[in-house]
Amino acid sequence: MQQYCLIRIIATETNMTYCVGLLLNEGMVLLSDTRTNAGLDNISTYRKMFCFEDPGERVVAILTAGSLSVTQTTIARLREAIEDEESDGETSIMKAPTMLKVAEIVGNMLAEVRVEIGEKLSVMKQSASASMIVAGQRRGGAMRVFLIYPEGNFIEATEDTPFLQIGEHKYGKPILDRVVRPETSLADAQKAVLLSMDSTLRSNLSVGMPLDLVVIEKDACKVTLRRRIEAGDPQFRAMSEAWSAALRDGFGQIVI
Amino acid sequence: MQQYCLIRIIATETNMTYCVGLLLNEGMVLLSDTRTNAGLDNISTYRKMFCFEDPGERVVAILTAGSLSVTQTTIARLREAIEDEESDGETSIMKAPTMLKVAEIVGNMLAEVRVEIGEKLSVMKQSASASMIVAGQRRGGAMRVFLIYPEGNFIEATEDTPFLQIGEHKYGKPILDRVVRPETSLADAQKAVLLSMDSTLRSNLSVGMPLDLVVIEKDACKVTLRRRIEAGDPQFRAMSEAWSAALRDGFGQIVI
Protein backbone atom coordinates (compact mmCIF):
# COMPACT_ATOMS: atom_id res chain seq x y z
CA MET A 1 0.00 0.00 0.00
CA GLN A 2 2.81 2.36 0.95
CA GLN A 3 4.47 1.59 -2.37
CA TYR A 4 1.26 2.20 -4.29
CA CYS A 5 0.67 5.57 -2.70
CA LEU A 6 4.21 6.68 -3.36
CA ILE A 7 3.91 5.93 -7.05
CA ARG A 8 0.50 7.56 -7.26
CA ILE A 9 1.79 10.79 -5.79
CA ILE A 10 4.77 10.93 -8.13
CA ALA A 11 2.50 10.24 -11.05
CA THR A 12 -0.12 12.84 -10.45
CA GLU A 13 1.87 15.69 -8.94
CA THR A 14 1.73 18.15 -11.80
CA ASN A 15 2.46 21.78 -12.35
CA MET A 16 -0.76 22.92 -13.95
CA THR A 17 1.17 26.12 -14.25
CA TYR A 18 1.10 29.13 -16.42
CA CYS A 19 4.46 30.36 -17.75
CA VAL A 20 5.12 32.97 -20.42
CA GLY A 21 8.28 34.30 -22.05
CA LEU A 22 8.54 37.48 -24.17
CA LEU A 23 11.31 38.27 -26.65
CA LEU A 24 11.39 42.04 -27.21
CA ASN A 25 13.79 44.47 -28.80
CA GLU A 26 14.77 45.78 -25.34
CA GLY A 27 15.08 42.42 -23.61
CA MET A 28 13.29 39.32 -22.35
CA VAL A 29 10.47 39.21 -19.78
CA LEU A 30 9.58 35.94 -18.04
CA LEU A 31 6.76 35.09 -15.65
CA SER A 32 5.68 31.89 -13.93
CA ASP A 33 3.30 30.89 -11.18
CA THR A 34 4.31 28.37 -8.48
CA ARG A 35 1.29 26.14 -7.90
CA THR A 36 1.70 22.39 -7.97
CA ASN A 37 -1.15 20.04 -7.32
CA ALA A 38 -1.81 16.36 -7.02
CA GLY A 39 -5.56 16.75 -6.88
CA LEU A 40 -7.35 19.75 -5.45
CA ASP A 41 -6.73 18.57 -1.87
CA ASN A 42 -2.98 18.42 -2.26
CA ILE A 43 -1.62 21.76 -3.35
CA SER A 44 1.94 22.97 -2.83
CA THR A 45 4.24 25.76 -3.93
CA TYR A 46 7.25 24.94 -6.10
CA ARG A 47 9.50 27.28 -7.99
CA LYS A 48 9.08 26.80 -11.72
CA MET A 49 11.64 29.34 -12.90
CA PHE A 50 15.35 28.59 -12.77
CA CYS A 51 18.04 31.14 -13.65
CA PHE A 52 21.65 30.29 -14.45
CA GLU A 53 24.06 33.21 -14.68
CA ASP A 54 27.66 34.01 -15.43
CA PRO A 55 27.00 37.77 -15.21
CA GLY A 56 28.11 39.67 -18.28
CA GLU A 57 28.99 36.42 -20.06
CA ARG A 58 25.81 34.36 -20.17
CA VAL A 59 22.33 34.07 -18.72
CA VAL A 60 19.90 31.18 -19.18
CA ALA A 61 16.42 31.07 -17.62
CA ILE A 62 14.27 27.93 -17.71
CA LEU A 63 10.54 27.88 -16.98
CA THR A 64 8.82 24.54 -16.45
CA ALA A 65 5.32 23.09 -16.74
CA GLY A 66 4.04 19.56 -16.30
CA SER A 67 4.94 16.59 -14.13
CA LEU A 68 7.00 17.78 -11.18
CA SER A 69 9.14 14.65 -11.07
CA VAL A 70 10.12 15.15 -14.71
CA THR A 71 10.89 18.87 -14.41
CA GLN A 72 12.79 18.55 -11.12
CA THR A 73 14.94 15.67 -12.37
CA THR A 74 15.66 17.46 -15.64
CA ILE A 75 16.72 20.66 -13.86
CA ALA A 76 18.80 18.69 -11.33
CA ARG A 77 20.71 16.90 -14.09
CA LEU A 78 21.28 20.11 -16.04
CA ARG A 79 22.65 21.63 -12.84
CA GLU A 80 24.91 18.63 -12.23
CA ALA A 81 26.34 19.00 -15.71
CA ILE A 82 27.01 22.71 -15.09
CA GLU A 83 28.80 21.93 -11.83
CA ASP A 84 30.78 19.04 -13.30
CA GLU A 85 34.26 20.42 -14.05
CA GLU A 86 34.75 17.91 -16.80
CA SER A 87 31.59 18.90 -18.69
CA ASP A 88 31.92 20.61 -22.04
CA GLY A 89 29.80 22.51 -24.55
CA GLU A 90 27.97 19.31 -25.39
CA THR A 91 26.53 18.78 -21.90
CA SER A 92 26.68 22.05 -19.91
CA ILE A 93 24.23 24.80 -20.82
CA MET A 94 26.75 27.32 -19.41
CA LYS A 95 29.45 26.15 -21.81
CA ALA A 96 27.39 25.43 -24.94
CA PRO A 97 28.71 27.49 -27.87
CA THR A 98 25.29 28.87 -28.88
CA MET A 99 21.80 29.35 -27.43
CA LEU A 100 20.55 26.89 -30.05
CA LYS A 101 22.87 24.31 -28.50
CA VAL A 102 21.50 25.23 -25.04
CA ALA A 103 17.97 24.48 -26.29
CA GLU A 104 19.18 21.17 -27.70
CA ILE A 105 20.81 20.14 -24.42
CA VAL A 106 17.67 21.00 -22.45
CA GLY A 107 15.44 19.25 -25.01
CA ASN A 108 17.53 16.08 -25.01
CA MET A 109 17.65 15.95 -21.23
CA LEU A 110 13.90 16.55 -20.92
CA ALA A 111 13.14 13.79 -23.43
CA GLU A 112 15.54 11.37 -21.70
CA VAL A 113 14.05 11.98 -18.25
CA ARG A 114 10.51 11.79 -19.58
CA VAL A 115 11.16 8.37 -21.12
CA GLU A 116 12.86 7.09 -17.93
CA ILE A 117 10.02 8.21 -15.67
CA GLY A 118 7.45 7.14 -18.25
CA GLU A 119 8.80 3.58 -18.05
CA LYS A 120 8.42 3.59 -14.26
CA LEU A 121 4.88 4.92 -14.51
CA SER A 122 3.76 2.59 -17.29
CA VAL A 123 3.41 -0.12 -14.62
CA MET A 124 0.55 1.95 -13.21
CA LYS A 125 -0.83 2.79 -16.66
CA GLN A 126 0.05 6.41 -16.02
CA SER A 127 2.27 8.80 -17.91
CA ALA A 128 4.30 11.90 -17.17
CA SER A 129 4.99 14.81 -19.42
CA ALA A 130 6.49 18.28 -19.23
CA SER A 131 7.40 21.25 -21.37
CA MET A 132 9.78 24.17 -20.84
CA ILE A 133 10.59 27.68 -21.96
CA VAL A 134 14.31 28.37 -22.34
CA ALA A 135 15.38 32.02 -22.64
CA GLY A 136 18.89 33.38 -22.72
CA GLN A 137 21.76 35.25 -24.25
CA ARG A 138 25.52 34.77 -24.35
CA ARG A 139 27.95 37.65 -24.80
CA GLY A 140 28.15 38.54 -28.48
CA GLY A 141 25.09 36.45 -29.36
CA ALA A 142 21.42 37.28 -29.84
CA MET A 143 18.67 36.94 -27.23
CA ARG A 144 16.67 33.82 -27.92
CA VAL A 145 13.55 32.25 -26.42
CA PHE A 146 12.58 28.62 -27.09
CA LEU A 147 9.61 26.45 -26.22
CA ILE A 148 10.78 22.86 -25.59
CA TYR A 149 8.17 20.15 -26.21
CA PRO A 150 7.96 16.99 -24.07
CA GLU A 151 9.60 15.04 -26.92
CA GLY A 152 12.64 17.34 -26.83
CA ASN A 153 12.06 19.22 -30.08
CA PHE A 154 11.46 22.96 -29.92
CA ILE A 155 10.21 26.13 -31.56
CA GLU A 156 11.52 29.65 -31.17
CA ALA A 157 10.00 33.09 -30.56
CA THR A 158 10.32 35.40 -33.55
CA GLU A 159 9.45 38.96 -34.53
CA ASP A 160 6.03 37.75 -35.70
CA THR A 161 5.42 35.68 -32.57
CA PRO A 162 7.29 37.47 -29.81
CA PHE A 163 5.85 35.40 -26.96
CA LEU A 164 5.73 31.74 -25.99
CA GLN A 165 3.52 30.16 -23.35
CA ILE A 166 3.39 26.79 -21.60
CA GLY A 167 0.83 25.24 -19.28
CA GLU A 168 -2.62 26.76 -18.88
CA HIS A 169 -2.03 29.31 -21.63
CA LYS A 170 -5.37 30.05 -23.24
CA TYR A 171 -7.02 32.33 -20.67
CA GLY A 172 -4.06 34.69 -20.78
CA LYS A 173 -3.47 34.70 -24.54
CA PRO A 174 -6.01 37.33 -25.70
CA ILE A 175 -4.32 40.18 -23.81
CA LEU A 176 -0.89 39.19 -25.16
CA ASP A 177 -2.26 38.91 -28.71
CA ARG A 178 -3.54 42.47 -28.44
CA VAL A 179 -0.64 44.15 -26.67
CA VAL A 180 2.72 42.46 -27.19
CA ARG A 181 4.90 43.48 -30.15
CA PRO A 182 8.72 43.32 -30.45
CA GLU A 183 8.87 47.09 -29.85
CA THR A 184 6.82 46.90 -26.61
CA SER A 185 8.76 48.50 -23.74
CA LEU A 186 9.99 46.36 -20.84
CA ALA A 187 7.64 48.24 -18.48
CA ASP A 188 4.60 47.56 -20.69
CA ALA A 189 5.75 43.98 -21.17
CA GLN A 190 5.80 43.39 -17.40
CA LYS A 191 2.31 44.83 -17.20
CA ALA A 192 1.15 42.60 -20.07
CA VAL A 193 2.46 39.34 -18.59
CA LEU A 194 1.08 40.21 -15.14
CA LEU A 195 -2.37 40.99 -16.59
CA SER A 196 -2.19 37.82 -18.66
CA MET A 197 -1.44 35.91 -15.43
CA ASP A 198 -4.23 37.80 -13.62
CA SER A 199 -6.80 36.57 -16.17
CA THR A 200 -5.47 33.02 -15.78
CA LEU A 201 -5.59 33.15 -11.97
CA ARG A 202 -9.20 34.31 -12.08
CA SER A 203 -10.30 31.57 -14.46
CA ASN A 204 -8.29 28.56 -13.27
CA LEU A 205 -7.80 27.34 -9.71
CA SER A 206 -4.83 25.17 -10.57
CA VAL A 207 -2.66 28.21 -11.30
CA GLY A 208 -1.69 30.13 -8.16
CA MET A 209 0.39 32.77 -6.38
CA PRO A 210 3.16 33.50 -5.60
CA LEU A 211 4.55 34.53 -8.97
CA ASP A 212 8.14 34.77 -10.19
CA LEU A 213 8.95 37.62 -12.56
CA VAL A 214 12.31 38.07 -14.24
CA VAL A 215 13.53 40.72 -16.68
CA ILE A 216 16.73 40.24 -18.69
CA GLU A 217 17.79 43.42 -20.48
CA LYS A 218 19.35 43.11 -23.92
CA ASP A 219 23.12 42.52 -23.85
CA ALA A 220 23.27 42.61 -20.03
CA CYS A 221 23.77 38.82 -20.06
CA LYS A 222 22.45 38.71 -16.50
CA VAL A 223 19.12 38.95 -14.69
CA THR A 224 18.32 42.66 -14.53
CA LEU A 225 15.24 42.39 -12.34
CA ARG A 226 13.93 39.54 -10.24
CA ARG A 227 10.70 39.84 -8.30
CA ARG A 228 8.66 37.36 -6.29
CA ILE A 229 5.04 38.49 -6.02
CA GLU A 230 3.35 36.96 -2.97
CA ALA A 231 -0.38 36.40 -2.56
CA GLY A 232 -1.85 39.69 -1.36
CA ASP A 233 0.98 41.77 -2.84
CA PRO A 234 -0.53 45.29 -2.69
CA GLN A 235 1.01 46.42 -5.97
CA PHE A 236 -0.28 43.37 -7.86
CA ARG A 237 -3.69 43.67 -6.27
CA ALA A 238 -3.91 47.38 -7.20
CA MET A 239 -2.98 46.55 -10.77
CA SER A 240 -5.53 43.74 -10.90
CA GLU A 241 -8.27 46.01 -9.55
CA ALA A 242 -7.35 48.84 -11.90
CA TRP A 243 -7.56 46.42 -14.82
CA SER A 244 -10.95 45.14 -13.69
CA ALA A 245 -12.20 48.72 -13.43
CA ALA A 246 -10.77 49.56 -16.87
CA LEU A 247 -12.48 46.51 -18.39
CA ARG A 248 -15.80 47.39 -16.73
CA ASP A 249 -15.57 51.01 -17.90
CA GLY A 250 -14.58 49.94 -21.41
CA PHE A 251 -17.40 47.41 -21.46
CA GLY A 252 -19.91 50.02 -20.30
CA GLN A 253 -18.93 52.42 -23.05
CA ILE A 254 -19.38 49.99 -25.91
CA VAL A 255 -22.62 50.25 -27.82
CA ILE A 256 -24.01 47.40 -29.89
CA MET B 1 -8.56 4.23 -51.27
CA GLN B 2 -11.91 5.88 -51.87
CA GLN B 3 -13.25 4.07 -48.86
CA TYR B 4 -10.31 5.11 -46.70
CA CYS B 5 -10.67 8.76 -47.59
CA LEU B 6 -14.35 8.73 -46.86
CA ILE B 7 -13.81 7.37 -43.38
CA ARG B 8 -10.94 9.76 -42.73
CA ILE B 9 -13.09 12.75 -43.56
CA ILE B 10 -15.95 11.63 -41.36
CA ALA B 11 -13.53 10.99 -38.56
CA THR B 12 -11.67 14.24 -38.55
CA GLU B 13 -14.38 16.68 -39.59
CA THR B 14 -14.85 18.49 -36.29
CA ASN B 15 -16.50 21.63 -35.07
CA MET B 16 -13.66 23.21 -33.15
CA THR B 17 -16.36 25.67 -32.27
CA TYR B 18 -17.03 28.09 -29.54
CA CYS B 19 -20.57 28.12 -28.12
CA VAL B 20 -21.84 29.88 -25.01
CA GLY B 21 -25.20 30.01 -23.25
CA LEU B 22 -26.22 32.50 -20.55
CA LEU B 23 -29.04 32.04 -18.05
CA LEU B 24 -30.09 35.47 -16.77
CA ASN B 25 -33.01 36.82 -14.80
CA GLU B 26 -34.37 38.50 -17.95
CA GLY B 27 -33.82 35.61 -20.34
CA MET B 28 -31.33 33.39 -22.13
CA VAL B 29 -28.63 34.53 -24.56
CA LEU B 30 -26.94 32.02 -26.89
CA LEU B 31 -24.06 32.43 -29.31
CA SER B 32 -22.22 30.03 -31.60
CA ASP B 33 -19.71 30.24 -34.41
CA THR B 34 -20.07 28.16 -37.60
CA ARG B 35 -16.60 26.94 -38.51
CA THR B 36 -16.00 23.27 -39.20
CA ASN B 37 -12.64 21.93 -40.20
CA ALA B 38 -11.07 18.67 -41.20
CA GLY B 39 -7.56 20.01 -41.12
CA LEU B 40 -6.62 23.59 -41.86
CA ASP B 41 -6.98 23.07 -45.62
CA ASN B 42 -10.57 21.86 -45.40
CA ILE B 43 -12.74 24.46 -43.72
CA SER B 44 -16.49 24.81 -44.12
CA THR B 45 -19.40 26.62 -42.57
CA TYR B 46 -22.07 24.64 -40.72
CA ARG B 47 -24.81 25.91 -38.49
CA LYS B 48 -24.20 24.80 -34.90
CA MET B 49 -27.31 26.31 -33.34
CA PHE B 50 -30.72 24.68 -33.75
CA CYS B 51 -33.95 26.21 -32.46
CA PHE B 52 -37.20 24.31 -31.98
CA GLU B 53 -40.27 26.42 -31.26
CA ASP B 54 -43.94 26.10 -30.48
CA PRO B 55 -44.30 29.86 -29.92
CA GLY B 56 -45.80 30.72 -26.57
CA GLU B 57 -45.77 27.07 -25.53
CA ARG B 58 -42.17 25.92 -25.70
CA VAL B 59 -38.77 26.85 -27.06
CA VAL B 60 -35.66 24.65 -27.10
CA ALA B 61 -32.30 25.75 -28.51
CA ILE B 62 -29.43 23.31 -28.99
CA LEU B 63 -25.80 24.38 -29.58
CA THR B 64 -23.30 21.76 -30.71
CA ALA B 65 -19.53 21.24 -30.60
CA GLY B 66 -17.37 18.32 -31.69
CA SER B 67 -17.54 15.73 -34.44
CA LEU B 68 -19.88 16.92 -37.17
CA SER B 69 -21.13 13.42 -37.97
CA VAL B 70 -22.14 12.92 -34.35
CA THR B 71 -23.85 16.28 -33.93
CA GLN B 72 -25.67 16.17 -37.28
CA THR B 73 -26.96 12.65 -36.71
CA THR B 74 -28.08 13.50 -33.17
CA ILE B 75 -29.96 16.60 -34.32
CA ALA B 76 -31.50 14.71 -37.27
CA ARG B 77 -32.83 11.97 -34.99
CA LEU B 78 -34.17 14.47 -32.47
CA ARG B 79 -35.93 16.20 -35.35
CA GLU B 80 -37.35 12.91 -36.62
CA ALA B 81 -38.77 12.19 -33.19
CA ILE B 82 -40.39 15.64 -33.08
CA GLU B 83 -41.97 15.11 -36.49
CA ASP B 84 -43.10 11.58 -35.71
CA GLU B 85 -46.79 11.85 -34.82
CA GLU B 86 -46.58 8.77 -32.65
CA SER B 87 -43.75 10.13 -30.49
CA ASP B 88 -44.45 10.98 -26.87
CA GLY B 89 -42.85 12.83 -23.97
CA GLU B 90 -40.25 10.09 -23.71
CA THR B 91 -38.78 10.67 -27.18
CA SER B 92 -39.81 14.12 -28.47
CA ILE B 93 -38.15 17.18 -26.93
CA MET B 94 -41.26 19.18 -27.92
CA LYS B 95 -43.53 16.89 -25.89
CA ALA B 96 -41.29 16.12 -22.89
CA PRO B 97 -43.05 17.13 -19.66
CA THR B 98 -40.09 19.13 -18.27
CA MET B 99 -36.87 20.75 -19.46
CA LEU B 100 -34.99 18.22 -17.36
CA LYS B 101 -36.57 15.49 -19.48
CA VAL B 102 -35.55 17.41 -22.62
CA ALA B 103 -31.93 17.37 -21.42
CA GLU B 104 -32.21 13.63 -20.75
CA ILE B 105 -33.59 12.91 -24.23
CA VAL B 106 -30.81 14.92 -25.88
CA GLY B 107 -28.17 13.33 -23.63
CA ASN B 108 -29.34 9.80 -24.34
CA MET B 109 -29.51 10.42 -28.09
CA LEU B 110 -26.04 12.00 -28.13
CA ALA B 111 -24.55 9.08 -26.19
CA GLU B 112 -26.28 6.53 -28.44
CA VAL B 113 -25.05 8.19 -31.65
CA ARG B 114 -21.55 8.65 -30.25
CA VAL B 115 -21.28 4.94 -29.45
CA GLU B 116 -22.64 3.94 -32.89
CA ILE B 117 -20.23 6.17 -34.79
CA GLY B 118 -17.42 5.30 -32.38
CA GLU B 119 -17.81 1.64 -33.33
CA LYS B 120 -17.50 2.49 -37.02
CA LEU B 121 -14.42 4.61 -36.40
CA SER B 122 -12.70 2.15 -34.10
CA VAL B 123 -11.68 0.21 -37.23
CA MET B 124 -9.47 3.18 -38.09
CA LYS B 125 -8.31 3.62 -34.50
CA GLN B 126 -10.12 6.96 -34.42
CA SER B 127 -12.85 8.28 -32.20
CA ALA B 128 -15.62 10.84 -32.39
CA SER B 129 -17.03 12.97 -29.63
CA ALA B 130 -19.38 15.89 -29.18
CA SER B 131 -20.99 18.03 -26.50
CA MET B 132 -24.04 20.27 -26.51
CA ILE B 133 -25.73 23.16 -24.75
CA VAL B 134 -29.49 22.79 -24.38
CA ALA B 135 -31.46 25.89 -23.38
CA GLY B 136 -35.19 26.28 -23.16
CA GLN B 137 -38.42 26.98 -21.39
CA ARG B 138 -41.91 25.52 -21.52
CA ARG B 139 -45.00 27.54 -20.60
CA GLY B 140 -45.32 27.60 -16.81
CA GLY B 141 -41.84 26.22 -16.26
CA ALA B 142 -38.51 27.86 -15.49
CA MET B 143 -35.83 28.78 -18.03
CA ARG B 144 -33.07 26.18 -17.90
CA VAL B 145 -29.67 25.82 -19.58
CA PHE B 146 -27.80 22.50 -19.61
CA LEU B 147 -24.38 21.39 -20.79
CA ILE B 148 -24.57 17.83 -22.16
CA TYR B 149 -21.35 15.82 -22.00
CA PRO B 150 -20.39 13.32 -24.74
CA GLU B 151 -21.38 10.47 -22.39
CA GLY B 152 -24.93 11.88 -22.13
CA ASN B 153 -24.78 13.14 -18.54
CA PHE B 154 -25.18 16.86 -17.94
CA ILE B 155 -24.76 19.85 -15.65
CA GLU B 156 -26.96 22.93 -15.35
CA ALA B 157 -26.37 26.68 -15.22
CA THR B 158 -27.22 28.19 -11.82
CA GLU B 159 -27.26 31.58 -10.15
CA ASP B 160 -23.63 31.07 -9.12
CA THR B 161 -22.58 29.90 -12.58
CA PRO B 162 -24.90 31.68 -14.98
CA PHE B 163 -23.03 30.68 -18.14
CA LEU B 164 -22.00 27.44 -19.82
CA GLN B 165 -19.49 27.04 -22.64
CA ILE B 166 -18.54 24.25 -25.04
CA GLY B 167 -15.69 23.91 -27.53
CA GLU B 168 -12.77 26.30 -27.49
CA HIS B 169 -13.93 28.01 -24.30
CA LYS B 170 -10.87 29.26 -22.48
CA TYR B 171 -9.94 32.35 -24.49
CA GLY B 172 -13.39 33.80 -23.98
CA LYS B 173 -13.89 32.90 -20.34
CA PRO B 174 -12.08 35.79 -18.58
CA ILE B 175 -14.50 38.43 -19.93
CA LEU B 176 -17.54 36.33 -18.90
CA ASP B 177 -16.06 35.72 -15.44
CA ARG B 178 -15.76 39.47 -14.96
CA VAL B 179 -19.04 40.66 -16.43
CA VAL B 180 -21.83 38.08 -16.39
CA ARG B 181 -24.14 37.89 -13.36
CA PRO B 182 -27.79 36.71 -13.24
CA GLU B 183 -28.91 40.35 -13.06
CA THR B 184 -26.95 41.35 -16.20
CA SER B 185 -29.31 42.94 -18.75
CA LEU B 186 -29.99 41.19 -22.06
CA ALA B 187 -28.26 44.05 -23.92
CA ASP B 188 -25.12 43.75 -21.79
CA ALA B 189 -25.28 39.98 -22.07
CA GLN B 190 -25.25 40.15 -25.89
CA LYS B 191 -22.26 42.46 -25.68
CA ALA B 192 -20.50 40.07 -23.27
CA VAL B 193 -20.94 36.95 -25.43
CA LEU B 194 -19.92 38.82 -28.58
CA LEU B 195 -16.76 40.16 -26.89
CA SER B 196 -16.06 36.70 -25.52
CA MET B 197 -16.35 35.35 -29.07
CA ASP B 198 -14.21 38.21 -30.38
CA SER B 199 -11.35 37.20 -28.04
CA THR B 200 -11.70 33.59 -29.18
CA LEU B 201 -11.72 34.51 -32.88
CA ARG B 202 -8.53 36.51 -32.44
CA SER B 203 -6.70 33.74 -30.61
CA ASN B 204 -7.88 30.63 -32.46
CA LEU B 205 -8.09 30.07 -36.18
CA SER B 206 -10.40 27.07 -35.87
CA VAL B 207 -13.27 29.24 -34.62
CA GLY B 208 -14.76 31.44 -37.34
CA MET B 209 -17.47 33.73 -38.63
CA PRO B 210 -20.37 33.88 -39.34
CA LEU B 211 -21.91 33.81 -35.87
CA ASP B 212 -25.42 32.87 -34.76
CA LEU B 213 -26.88 34.88 -31.90
CA VAL B 214 -30.21 34.12 -30.27
CA VAL B 215 -32.03 35.80 -27.39
CA ILE B 216 -34.96 34.12 -25.64
CA GLU B 217 -36.76 36.49 -23.29
CA LYS B 218 -38.12 35.10 -20.05
CA ASP B 219 -41.62 33.59 -20.37
CA ALA B 220 -41.86 34.41 -24.08
CA CYS B 221 -41.38 30.68 -24.84
CA LYS B 222 -40.12 31.64 -28.30
CA VAL B 223 -37.01 33.11 -29.90
CA THR B 224 -37.21 36.86 -29.29
CA LEU B 225 -34.20 37.84 -31.36
CA ARG B 226 -32.25 35.90 -33.97
CA ARG B 227 -29.25 37.40 -35.70
CA ARG B 228 -26.66 35.98 -38.08
CA ILE B 229 -23.48 38.04 -37.99
CA GLU B 230 -21.51 37.63 -41.22
CA ALA B 231 -17.77 38.15 -41.62
CA GLY B 232 -17.23 41.89 -42.08
CA ASP B 233 -20.48 42.82 -40.31
CA PRO B 234 -19.95 46.56 -39.72
CA GLN B 235 -21.65 46.56 -36.32
CA PHE B 236 -19.58 43.62 -35.04
CA ARG B 237 -16.40 45.12 -36.42
CA ALA B 238 -17.12 48.48 -34.77
CA MET B 239 -17.73 46.73 -31.45
CA SER B 240 -14.54 44.72 -31.81
CA GLU B 241 -12.53 47.84 -32.60
CA ALA B 242 -14.09 49.82 -29.75
CA TRP B 243 -13.21 46.99 -27.36
CA SER B 244 -9.62 46.88 -28.65
CA ALA B 245 -9.36 50.63 -28.13
CA ALA B 246 -10.87 50.37 -24.65
CA LEU B 247 -8.40 47.63 -23.73
CA ARG B 248 -5.47 49.63 -25.08
CA ASP B 249 -6.58 52.75 -23.20
CA GLY B 250 -7.13 50.79 -20.01
CA PHE B 251 -3.78 49.10 -20.42
CA GLY B 252 -2.05 52.43 -20.96
CA GLN B 253 -3.54 53.91 -17.81
CA ILE B 254 -2.40 51.14 -15.49
CA VAL B 255 0.72 51.83 -13.49
CA ILE B 256 2.84 49.06 -12.03
Image (cartoon, coloured by chain):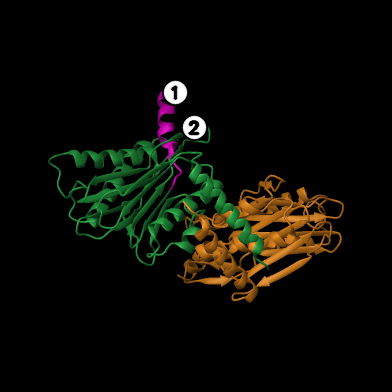
Chain colours: A green, B orange
Identify the residue shown where x is 38% and y is 44%: A227
Question: Mark 1 is on which residue type?
Answer: Met
The residue that label 1 is drawn on is: A1
Identify the residue shown where x is 63% and y is 74%: B230
B142 is higher (above) or lower (below) than B186: above
Q: Which residues are magenta?
A: A2-18
Q: Residues within 10 Å of mark 2 (few under 14, many from 20)?
A: few
Q: Are marks 1 and 2 on the same chain?
A: yes
Question: Mark 2 is on which residue type?
Answer: Asn
Secondary structure beneath disc 1? loop
In space, the residues marked 1 and 2 are separated at their CA atoms by 19 Å
A44 is higher (above) or lower (below) than B161: above
Q: Nearer the viewer, residue A161 or B164?
A: A161
The residue that label 2 is drawn on is: A42
Give the quarter of the figure containing the N terminus of chain B: bottom left
Q: Furthest-top residue in view? A: A2
- Left or right of B10? Residue A136 is left
- Left or right of B179? Residue A59 is left
Please state which of the two labelled residues, at mark 1 or mark 2, is closer to the viewer.
2
